[in-house]
Amino acid sequence: MKQFLKTSILSLLILLLFNKFIYAQKEFDDIRGTQHWMRFTDAPNSLYHYLANQAYFYLNKRSDEISRINSLSEWKQRQQWIKNTLKETVGPFPQKTPLNARITNTFSEDGYHLEDIVYESQPNYYVTSTLFIPDNLKNGKAPAIVYCSGHSNNGYRADIYQHEILNLVKKGFVVFAFDPMGQGERLQYFNPETNKSIFKYPSYEHSYPGAQLFITGNTLAGDFIWDGIRAVDYLLTRKEVDPARIGITGGSGGGTQSAYIAAFDNRIMAAAPRNYFTNFTRLYESMGPQDAEQNFFYGIKRGIDMADLLLARAPKPVLMVTTSRDMFPIQGAIETAKEVARLYQAYGKQQNFGIVTDDAPHASTKSNREAFYAFFQKFLDNPGDSTDQETKSLPENELKVTATGQLATSLKGETAFSLNRKDAEKRMEKLESERKDFPAYLTKMLASAKKLSGYEEPKSNGKSMFAGRIQRDGYVIEKYLIKGEGNYMIPYLLLKPETPNGKALIYLNPMGKTADAGAGEQMEWFVKNNITVLAPDIVGTGELGPGIFHGDSYIDSVSYNLWFASMLIGRSIVGIQAGDVVRLSHLLENQLHFKEIYGLAIKQMAPVLLHAAAFHKNIKKLALISPYSSYRSIVMNHHYDPHFIQSTVAGSIGIYDLPDLAASISPNKILITGVSDGTGNTENVTDIDKDMSVIRAACKHKNASKQLQILPTPGVEKLTDILKSWLAD
């Protein structure tokens, strides 16, 4: 009984403390606080909706252009534009180099034999694959199918993929299946202790390095497509293959790959992408953008939609294979098919394009399999029975290409990360050379930073809406909302001392405005020093985020897909957030008439403040608490901190970096304390100093070395002393 009472009392105390925490949280909320504004109840999803609305603008513009095409000559012009634009969005492919293909195993089965093969799509960049060859080929040659695997951990070895492959082989097709990067024997983040990836899903294996490629200005889609193009190159070396009868197929992620590769490689006669097609409008309206390889650089802003992958290859045969309850909205697939059919009709080749739909979820179905078997039999001139036959999965050892079952522990070689890092190093050489022309390079750098980040200068400031007041000992906290860049309201706290000194501080915390607003916490310290503090929930944080959208690459509680959504429209999350910080600085300067404005940012909010202060010079002092040093450091480290990704800018490597923004702010006073590298490690002195030296050199050139403090991570009491020094004139 005593134990029960103790437990009950403890539970009650925990409940009271929890309720007190919840109340304190609501006390500072402007939107979901005591007034609970119904108008803003979807506020946490503001960032996604804002990005989506901008995507709809470009997609509607594209639809209008397509609707005005009325002749084959106009369609052909459009096709050429699509092909050129696709090349721009993917980036240049590497030069073709020797494949150095090696057969590692051969096995004979009933009616066919197979060869396990490893080839190099780029020098020392290995692709594991298996070639399935029917026995007794007619005329010594057969049509061949490039088989692309969806998001399975074991690549084409998954039972359903084997079933489809073996059915095609039994129908007389040579089939060449290869592992996509991050799957099968090509894991990029292999853990030898578990013999698995360190990541839970293949989409994580794609997006984690894929983000690094985007920051550098490259695309993972380009790597995936190139692997497929080189697969076709290999098929053309085989005597068993008829070069005029090559097809490609794959489901889910394999549907993505087959659609991409077919759009870029004219040697592919017939394509049957499966369980992939919708359109971007319906995708944004439903599940949102997907993992890294499914996104082209600025793809939507440049006017590309999924239909363009099929329009580019018309009038060659295409079959869209879909299901009515797919996670990729079927309505988008119907709309895409309707658009593509117009072009085939203009060519007078309506028979070359079709769509089949089975009533099923995101899956391979018997009806759909028989449809694409028949499609290839017709268009690759290989007639026969299209019935889906029973098959037995092959023994694991027959599809084991490398000695250890993983490139990471056998041939090793390059990875998507290592290839990108080499390219990033070359690009950084250019930036480092430009930095020598100081300060002339800063003007060009800032213009590039505005463009790449998608920053938009705030045009005007609306009036703030008052939402409540909280009295504290010696100061008052007022709650407000003000319109941000998009159709959302920025909630902010204004902490006002009894005797203000005319100085205001914008306080940015990735956890939101309430994180340090409690009695005795950091913001109160500034107010007790007579500084007015403005603490906002920048879009994507606090009451404005992160929202319910996660996507298929939700790594360490960070939505990579949200970042991809911004990149697709030529924006960045950090650029949008920086614009809102500038908007708040205008408020302080023009409406509240503060003489001096400072900024303090914690961790991944530091890039937001740096962009804002570099683009608008009214923020006179900056304090960066526990920031990371650079975008360069994220790209150069195999394992980086995912929490930094949403504050990065695609295409920035070699053009500008965070130290350059800080350099442009000098001679304004800058405090940097507890800086880490891209992994979050504060002990990597060499790497960190590489970035800090850029800022030091700028301050030295401007005779402002005393205006810069770069200090190690302090304790709480020490931080107070550091901030006192930073505030001092």
Image (tube, rainbow, N blue to C red):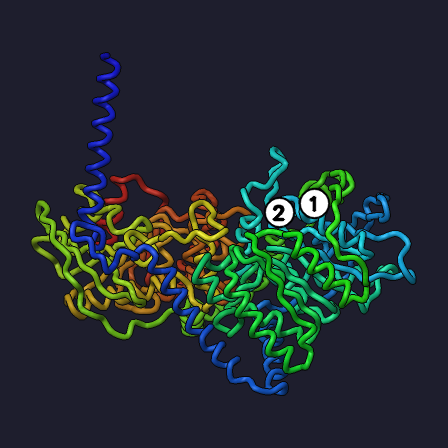
Q: Quadrant of the C terminus?
A: bottom left
Q: Is residue 361 visible?
A: yes
User: For this view, does 211 lie left or right of residue 135?
Assistant: left
Of 208 and 175, the residue lying toward us: 175
Residue 354, above or below 12: below
User: For this view, does 275 lie left or right of residue 586?
Assistant: right
* Residue 506 position by quadrant: bottom left
Which residue is drawn at the image coordinates 68% and 51% (left, top)? 179
Q: Please rate how many residues cluster around mark 1, counting C-alpha atoms within 10 Å: few if below 14, some from 14 to 19, many from 20.
A: many
Circle 2: element type: loop
* Residue 48 position by quadrant: bottom left
* Residue 30 position by quadrant: bottom left
Circle 1: element type: helix
Which residue is drawn at the image coordinates 34% and 63% (left, top)? 578
CB contact under 8 Å: marks 1 and 2 = yes
User: For this view, does 33 lie left or right of residue 60?
Assistant: left
Q: Which residue is mark 2?
A: 152
- Specify the amino acid type for callout 2: Ser
Q: Which residue is mark 1?
A: 157
Q: Quadrant of the N terminus?
A: top left
- Specify the amino acid type for callout 1: Arg
Where is residue 150? Give x, y as percent. Answer: 62, 52
